[in-house]
Amino acid sequence: MDVQDFNYYYPDYPVPSDLISIQPYAVNDDEVPSGTGDINREGYTYGELRHQPIINELLEAIEHSKIKEMAAACNRRNAKEGFHMFKVDEEYCFWGLRVGPMVPLPSAEEMKSILLCSKKEAIIEAVINKTVTQRMIRDVTYDLLRKNLAVNCDLSLKEAKEVIGNVLDCTPHEDQSSGLIFMVPNWAHRWFHHDGYVKHTLRILNHKTEGEEEF
């Protein structure tokens, strides 16, 4: 498989103009995803999960009609061909596993501005001192996705968080190449270890010029 295969499986992926590479990443269908957070305790194989990312145990318990449709849409998308993992610019691409809304991510400069407007002095100081943490960035990006889900499904922010993590057993994924954040099943997100957007943004925000280096 090559770039043409990627375009075949994911023709709607917003490929960036400065894209460096797209590479297939082969995974044996017989492998059983496992890892932190007690993922895939049901013991499904990768071959099963890539054709039905949201398992029946979760799908059947969803009561909210819009949330249920989001999960079902992900399953329908993958039912025939199955999810195929690629690496886009060396990072795992979860595009085929996306669930629900896709929200634009802040650029590094936009993130800096957002953090500087924080009500927490410690966060403002971290930006100034170039000691921003992963948690500070994810508090912003995760909130963007939760707010979007809350508005579209008439939920509170607390309910939106519950839906993502427990009802759907998903997690917010910041996709560096597309510049979007969306939900991805936990079994995949915790199995395919990656860095992406957060690492890229931290590198920019915490970069110190020669005159700023500590001695």
Image (cartoon, rainbow, N blue to C red):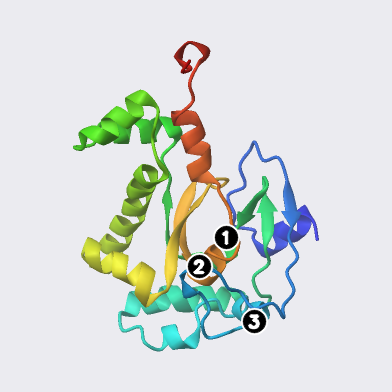
What is the CA distance from the residue labelled 3 to the residue labelled 1?
20 Å
Q: Give the x, y percent position of residue 175.
A: 52, 51
Q: Residue furthest right?
A: 1
Name the secondary structure under disc 3. loop
Q: Give the x, y percent position of residue 172.
A: 43, 59
Query: Considering only order in the chain, which callout, 1 or 3, is on the residue closer to the N terminus?
Result: 3
Q: Label 1: how many residues lie within 10 Å, few (<14), some (14-19) or many (20+)?
A: many
Q: Residue furthest front?
A: 215
Q: Give the x, y percent position of residue 138.
A: 38, 48
**Would you name the residue on which mark 1 appears?**
95
Q: How many marks?
A: 3
Q: On screen, 213 above or below 188?
A: above
**Would you name the residue on which mark 3 appears?**
45
Q: Is residue 190 left or right of residue 134?
A: right
What's the amino acid at mark 3? Thr
Q: On screen, 88 above or below 58?
A: above
> Residue 63's quadrant in the figure?
bottom left
